[in-house]
Amino acid sequence: MKGEDGMTELLKTIKGRKSVRTFDGRPVSAEDREKLEQYIATITNPFGIPVRFVLLDAKEHGLSSPVLSGETLYAAGIVPKLPNADTAFGYAFEKLVLYAWSLGIGTTWIGGTMKRDVFERAAGLGEGEMMPCVSPLGYPAKKRSIKETMMRKGVGADTRQPAEKIFFDGEWDKPLPAEKQAAIGDLAEMVRWSPSAVNKQPWRVIVTDNGCHFYEKRDRGYSGEKTGDLQKIDVGIALCHFMMGMEEQGDNPCLAVDNPGLEVPENVEYIATVKK
Ligand SMILES: Cc1cc2nc3c(=O)[nH]c(=O)nc-3n(C[C@H](O)[C@H](O)[C@H](O)COP(=O)(O)O)c2cc1C
């Protein structure tokens, strides 16, 4: 159902969410923490790969990030190193990010700006697992720090590419005609407004009669043994928004990793297909 502003609850949450790097220093209340923990216990992903969440007290474990201030709690996510693990991780962790925002709790995906070893030790990372990203959890301060404002400007955090650059009609780079664009409607907005590492927005979608095929348009320097491929995580986030959007519309989406073999440029990799 759409509100007076023409947006559904989910679209409002997705468009309203911003990374929060300046917190007011208040600890997350016992009530909110319990809600977060209860929600975490329900999080699944369509890849069927288990993603484990650990909540970590910042002071107790000596955790910090040079881009953050005032945070007292972190969530770390851990996933076994399996095919599609990065995408599954993105999907699952974004569910927590959106839920936290709906409670008034701010987050920032952190895949780079942290002392990784300290977080991995605190989170109890095991053999064969990776901890691609963490996030602070806390109440946003009234005013962003200067550092945060500069960071947002640097990556154009308040802007996204237009839908024509993301959704294609049957083949790479062919824009969807207006009627097909309109049919996707809110779902395109939900994908567009996904967060991504350095706001690179590497997701692309080719729409065919057989479903919506999601791809990663890769840039250099976003992949490592410890983080996995951060841009596959970004695509997992976009998939999460798209499938949650379909569910909100009353559809029952299903995801398959089944490459349709369409021709794409060299730096583009097929990830997964969503069908009704
Ligand atoms: C996988 C991933 C990794 C990220 N890593 C960092 C990071 O290490 N440090 C940071 O300050 N922001 C990080 N971000 C946040 C992005 O910079 C941010 O989402 C993007 O600029 C868009 O801004 P918004 O989230 O406010 O919409 C990351 C985001 C994603 C999705």
Image (cartoon, grey):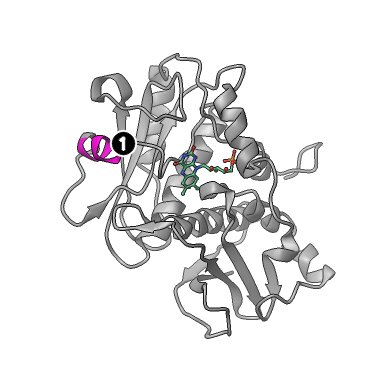
Q: In this view of the protein, which residue sits in the foreground, 157 or 206?
A: 157
> How far across and how far down the image is residue 220, in percent?
47, 62
Residue in the picture at 46% in, 30% down: 67
Instruction: Give the position of the N terminus as an image quadrant.
Output: top right
Q: Is residue 25 magenta?
A: no
- Answer above or below: position of 193 versus 26: below
Magenta residues? 115-121
Q: In this view of the protein, which residue sits in the foreground, 74 or 68?
A: 68
Question: Which residue in the structure is indicated by mark 1?
Answer: 115
Q: In this view of the protein, which residue sits in the foreground, 227 or 91?
A: 227
Left or right: where does residue 187 sit relative to residue 33?
right
> How far across and how far down the image is residue 142, in percent?
61, 16
- Answer above or below: position of 71 versus 166: above
Left or right: where does residue 176 sit relative to residue 128?
right
- Seen as rendered, the residue at the extreme left is 127
Q: How many marks?
A: 1
Quick one: SS at disc 1? loop
Residue in the picture at 25% in, 20% down: 60
- Seen as rendered, the residue at the extreme right is 178
The image quarter containing residue 123 is top left
> How far across and how far down the image is residue 160, in percent?
69, 50
- Mark 1 neighbour class, 10 Å CA radius: few under 14, some 14 to 19, many 20 or more: few
- Answer above or below: position of 253 versus 151: below
Q: In this view of the protein, which residue sits in the foreground, 220 or 180?
A: 220
| Residue 18 seen in the figure | no
Q: Does mark 1's beta carbon lie closer than 8 Å to ligand 1?
A: no
Query: Which amino acid is tagged 1?
Result: Lys
Q: Is residue 118 magenta?
A: yes
Instruction: Give the position of the C terminus as an image quadrant.
Output: bottom right
Residue in the picture at 42% in, 22% down: 71
Please, what is the dominant secondary structure of the magenta stretch? Answer: helix
| Residue 180 seen in the figure | yes
